[in-house]
Structure formats: C-alpha cells, structure tokens
C-alpha cells in the first residue's frame, strides 16, 4: 500500500473542467476592513479508531497531522467555524454511541485555525451533565470561543447570542440542535431548536448592532442527501427573521446549498443544509468526506452583501501506518486523479465520494460552485483579532 509520497501542502494549481480557481477577484481582500471571508465545516467527530490512531508513543494525542493538508486554507479565513460533535468528558475515552474525546482535539482545532466551535448537537449530553460542564470548562481553559451549551441560565443570558468582532464587522452566532438523544444535561443547558426561542435570540442579536447573523443548525435526517421539509421550513423562518447565513450539520453527508437574493438583486442570504463530515470514521456511503464552505461578505451601505461563495470538497484518507489507522483530510481536487499519492483502492473511494457529491451539488446548488484552493495569506495574530462581546438579556415587550 502506498502512502502519500510528498508534502501535500505543496499543491498543484492546474485548473480543470468543472472547478473554479479562487482568485483575488472573488475572494475578499485580506487587508480590507470592510470585507470579510468566513469558512465553515461540518461535523468533527471522534470515533475510537480516530483517537487510537492519534495516540503517540509518548502517550500524547496528536491530531494536527490529520489537518495538515487543509490547515492553510482554514488559516486563510478571517473567521473559521466548526461543529464539535464530541463532548470532552475526560477518560475513559469512548466512541460511538456515547462519545468522549481527548481534550487535544479541541486544542489542535484551535492550532490549525478554527476560531469558533459549535457545541449544540445530539451527542452533547452523551456523558450527562458532568460531560457538558467539563466540555465548557476545557474549552474555556484553552481560550477557545464556543457556543451552544452553557453551565446555567445566567451564563446563557450573559453570553448568548455569541457576538464576535472581526475587522469592522460584528457577527452574531446562533447554534441549536434538534435533539440530545434523549439524554439530559440538567441543570446545564443545551440550545434546542425552538422557533419562539430562536426568534427571541435573533432579536437580541439585532439589538447588539450585528452586521451578520449566522445560525448553525444541527438538524435533518442522517445519511439523507436532500433536506427534509422541516429543514426547509426552519430556513425560511430564520431568513424571514433576519438571519443571513444558515449552516447545517448532522446528516453526515453533503446536502445542497443555495444563495438568496433580495428584491433589489442583492445577495444577502445563504443556506448550506449540510456540510457533511469534516472528519470521522463512519463507514457508510458518502460519509467519508464533506465540504469546506467559503463565503466572502462586504459592507455595502447598512446591509451586508455576499460577493462570493464556494465549496471545496474534502475527503478523509485512512491509511494503516505502524499498526494504526490514521486519518488525513485531503482536498479532493488535488488527489483524486494522482496515482503517485494514493493507491488504486483509495483512488476508487475518493472517486466515488467526489462523483456523488458533484452530481448532487452541480444539479441542486444555486449560485455556489466548487473552487480550488490557492495559497492564501494566513490570519495575522488570529486569536487576538477576535473580540467576544457578550449580549445581556433583553426583556421582550
């Protein structure tokens, strides 16, 4: 079995049919304070095969190699967000069906460029209230900005909606889940999908003078490649009440994306029903990869304008190395046809994933195409340029 024969961060930039090469004409200028580039990814999972493969001989869990081939792309964004679908409940670590992952996964996500982790999902309460509290404590101790679960109602009132300031933008981030698999975090809180509560939270975000409102929704049916009626209804409700970007997770497979336009032709809304798995060890068809969604927004008068949006397909390469299964996230476009980097069996797997994803997205996406990663300027002092600004409770009249 072949392994990767070269440092895959040295990318081949040869455009080919069907894939757009991101250019300075479409991606926001890094130095422009009135333009911002956001990156979103789907589910970050921790099956037992993943953390066993990340365990070094010195007893340290090291996940950075998993991300090294897409690290520069994550770091290129002004703000990058991921769905952390695993509680950090401490030892003994466990995979499906009740997860508890090593703390190092969160720290390594921070190291490779993620600024905000979303924590409201159906596995939030896998280890009960103690697991929820420990997850919040660990993320806080690492200085990782997060939202979706809270120690108590007072903390939610003080810190939700999450408001981050990047460049000249104030961004409100909302996060909800459809379920916690029947498990409770009492007296801790997990944000559940409830239309009345969501509308109240959106109003608070508006009162914070947010330029952009993002709703990260954990919803839908697992393994279904098209959104269900409930996802569509919730999306319309979110847009109607002022949300700009609706980003979905949970199905573990990619679902369609769509840009929306106002009556004056301005593109100011976008929905990605599911970005699939960013990294996992799931064996089911189409779960071995996902999409990085990249969105550029400018301030155009009092309202934001989406100037460009694109997706980059990523696939999880799982070779055996030193008796362990390792996991590496690869940009599909750079490795799907290269027999020098992947052997025949892996080329077949990546090809199956890519064909199915493109067939769906090329047919059903609206205004969002596939792009190829180009070198980008990394964020400068990334962690220092994000200012969290908690929003106090506002009594609705």
Image (cartoon, grey):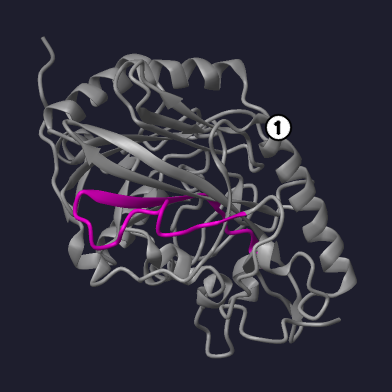
Between 212 and 138, which is closer to the camera in this rendering?
212
Please say whether residue 257 is visible from this viewpoint: yes
- For this view, does 145 lie left or right of residue 292? left
Element under disc 1: helix
Please say whether residue 152 is visible from this viewpoint: no
The location of residue 97, given as percent across then percent down, is: 64, 47
Which residue of the protein is positioned furthest toward the right in this rendering?
Answer: 344
Q: Is residue 8 magenta?
A: no
- For this view, does 85 lie left or right of residue 379? right
Q: Quadrant of residue 315?
A: bottom right
- For label 1, the residue is 363
The location of residue 162, given as percent across then percent down, is: 24, 42
Q: Is residue 22 magenta?
A: yes
Between 164 and 12, which is closer to the camera in this rendering?
12
Q: Quadrant of residue 206?
A: top left
Q: Which residues are magenta?
A: 20-49
Q: Quadrant of residue 13?
A: bottom right
Task: Identify the residue at image location x=41%, y=69%.
Answer: 376
């Amino acid at each position: 079995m072949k392994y990767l024969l070269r440092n895959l961060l040295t990318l081949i930039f040869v455009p080919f049919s069907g894939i757009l090469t991101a250019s300075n004409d479409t991606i926001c200028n890094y130095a422009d304070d009135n333009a911002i580039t956001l990156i979103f990814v789907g589910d970050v999972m921790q099956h037992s095969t993943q953390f066993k493969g990340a365990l070094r001989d010195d007893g340290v869990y090291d996940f950075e190699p998993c991300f090294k081939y897409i690290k520069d792309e994550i770091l290129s964004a002004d703000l990058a967000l991921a769905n952390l679908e695993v509680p950090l409940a401490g030892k003994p670590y466990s995979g499906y069906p009740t997860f508890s992952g090593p703390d190092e996964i969160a720290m390594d996500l921070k190291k490779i460029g993620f600024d905000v982790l979303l924590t409201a999902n159906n596995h939030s309460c896998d280890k009960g209230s103690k697991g929820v509290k420990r997850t919040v404590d660990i993320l806080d101790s690492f200085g990782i900005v997060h939202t979706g679960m809270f120690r108590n109602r007072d903390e939610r009132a003080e810190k939700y909606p999450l408001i981050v300031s990047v460049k000249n933008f104030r961004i409100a981030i909302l996060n909800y889940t459809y379920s916690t698999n029947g498990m409770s975090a009492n007296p801790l809180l997990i944000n559940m999908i409830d239309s009345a509560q969501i509308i109240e939270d959106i109003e608070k975000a508006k009162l914070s003078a947010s330029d952009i409102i993002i709703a990260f929704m954990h919803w839908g049916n697992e393994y279904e490649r098209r959104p269900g009626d409930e996802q569509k209804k919730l999306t319309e409700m979110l847009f109607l009440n002022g949300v700009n970007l609706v980003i979905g997770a949970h199905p573990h497979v990619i679902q369609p994306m769509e840009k929306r336009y106002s009556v004056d032709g301005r593109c100011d809304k976008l929905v990605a029903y599911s970005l699939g798995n960013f990294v996992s060890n799931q064996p089911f068809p189409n779960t071995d990869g996902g999409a990085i969604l990249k969105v550029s927004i400018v301030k155009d008068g009092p309202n934001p304008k989406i100037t460009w949006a694109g997706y980059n397909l990523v696939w999880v390469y799982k070779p055996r190395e030193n008796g362990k299964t390792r996991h590496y996230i690869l940009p599909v476009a750079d490795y799907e046809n290269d027999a020098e980097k992947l052997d025949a069996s892996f080329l077949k797997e990546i090809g199956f994933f890519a064909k199915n994803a493109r067939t769906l997205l090329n047919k059903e996406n609206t205004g969002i195409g596939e792009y190829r990663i180009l070198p980008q300027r990394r964020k400068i002092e990334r962690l220092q340029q994000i200012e969290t600004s908690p929003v106090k409770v506002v009594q609705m009249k």
